[in-house]
Amino acid sequence: MTQTSLTNGKPETILVITDNPLSEKVVTDRKQRNEATVSLGVNMLEVETEKRPLDIVQVSISVGPRRSNTSTRRYKLEFEGGGEKRLKGRLSMEERWEAFGNTYQIDTRFDASIVPGK
């Protein structure tokens, strides 16, 4: 989805990858996405990009009891097409990342619906 950045007011594209399906209403609302990770226990990766979809600004990891933002230098985002209403691809980390006593290694494929943001 595309929405306005909270940090600089510019348009950004956000790719939301979850382990459970979420409604379009939840996906397009930052507050409801955050609540879904807490109240519903949804594990989520949010990939924020600017300008071109491959220019990752940050990846927010909402897995387990903590939520952490990480550097873009660790990620690789690849698109495999999908059509007008779908986006397919892969998000991976170039190296493991450690924070708060946890080690993260991300390598996931996604097939997501494209929805307009708020």
Image (cartoon, grey):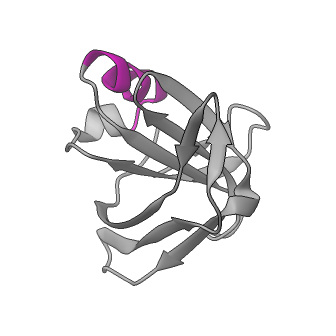
The magenta stretch spans residue 110 = no
Q: Residue at x 54, y 28 (%)?
A: 67
Span of residues in magenta: 28-39
Left or right of residue 97, residue 20 in this image: left
**Residue 83 coordinates in the image, percent (x, y):** 31, 80
Left or right of residue 72, residue 27 in this image: left
Q: Residue furthest top?
A: 39
Q: Residue at x 36, y 71 (%)?
A: 87
The magenta stretch spans residue 38 = yes
Q: Residue at x 21, y 42 (%)?
A: 20
Residue 80 appears in which quarter of the rendering? Answer: bottom left
Residue 50 can be seen, yes or no: no
- Above or below 6: residue 92: below
- Above or below 94: residue 115: above
User: Looking at the image, which is closer to me, 57 or 104?
Assistant: 104
- Above or below 55: residue 117: above
